[in-house]
Amino acid sequence: MPLPLSPSRSSVVAALRAAGCVFAEDEAELILGAARTPEELAAMVDRRTTGLPLELVLGWAEFRGLRIAVEPGVFVPRRRTEFLVEQALAAAPDASVVVDLCCGSGAVGAVLAAALGRIELHAADIDPAAVDCARRNVARYDGRVHQGDLYAALPGELRGRVDILAANVPYVPTAEVGLLPAEARDHEPSVALDGGADGLDVLRRVVAGAAEWLAPGGCLLTETSERQAPDAVAAFTGAGLTTRLAVSEELYAHVVIGTG
């Protein structure tokens, strides 16, 4: 649905609704607030109506009250992951060293730093695009971002010092990645989604190495699905961590917490 030369709120809503956007009114408000000129507005609406996720159209995603910068090719933080942050703060309210592993945009590390105050924050991801994006989001907290495969990315000086090790690992089984909504399947990197045959390959690797990095009493937290939760809990317990599963029915979120 083409927009008029000077798009109005009603014409933006109509265009979004025609493209199948369920929350057309809310999205229109955000796009209208972000566009600086009628031409930019028309371009943003065009990108949204042709399938680009709203967060990438805006250039940011809201996550636990913060605007997190997001870019094409970087995993967009989900609202359910706010539950992981809440569990981390409850488990280690006095944390001074935080690591955001598989950090994507760095959203988890940024909101933990915002809540905890002055901390030593590190984030890591294997994807260079994610590393660049995360640097933008954690810079205000003097966070350091490292590129590499899980713990290989981290400076050795962190061994035995980490109070919160948050790892929002990919956990979609390989065979199910193609079944994800198009906004994830077509616009987010497979490395941020694909967790291997049963979805737990990366989780198992994180759990296996956690004890070496956690401070005494430090905690590892990772998100999983309801179906995978029993096996994830078993992996944590098998690694010698004191383990519990936290569930949010409202957010349909499942977080495994292991304390060293």
Image (cartoon, rainbow, N blue to C red):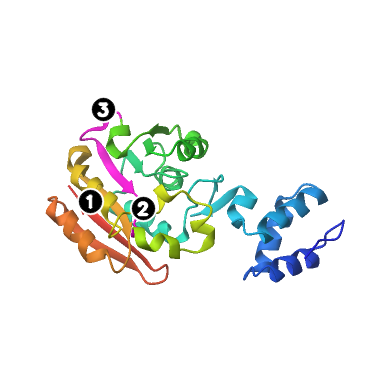
Q: Earlier in the sequence, mark 1 or mark 2?
A: 2
The residue lying at 42 percent from left, 71 percent from top is 250
- Is residue 119 in view from this perspective? no
Q: Is residue 163 magenta?
A: yes
Tell me the magenta residue range. 155-173
**Helix, strand or loop for disc 2:** loop
Q: Element under label 1?
A: helix
- Name the residue tied to disc 3: 157
Q: Which mark is residue 204?
A: 1
Q: Look at label 1 and name its amino acid.
A: Arg
Q: Which residue is mark 2?
A: 170
**Which image quarter is the N terminus in?**
bottom right
Decide if residue 170 is on the left or right side of residue 36. Answer: left
**Label 1 crowd (10 A; few <14 / some 14-19 / many >=20):** some
Residue sticking out furthest to the right: 5
Asked if the residues shown at circle 3 and circle 2 are in contact, with their CB atoms under 8 angstroms apart, the answer is no
Which quadrant holds residue 226? bottom left
Q: Is residue 215 left or right of residue 106?
A: left
Point out residue 67 in the picture as x, y percentages from the top left corner. 56, 48
244 to the left or right of 59? left
Residue at screen point 66% across, 59% down: 50
Looking at the rendered structure, the secondary structure element under dot 3 is helix
Distance from disc 3 to disc 1, alpha carbons, whole Å, reads 23 Å
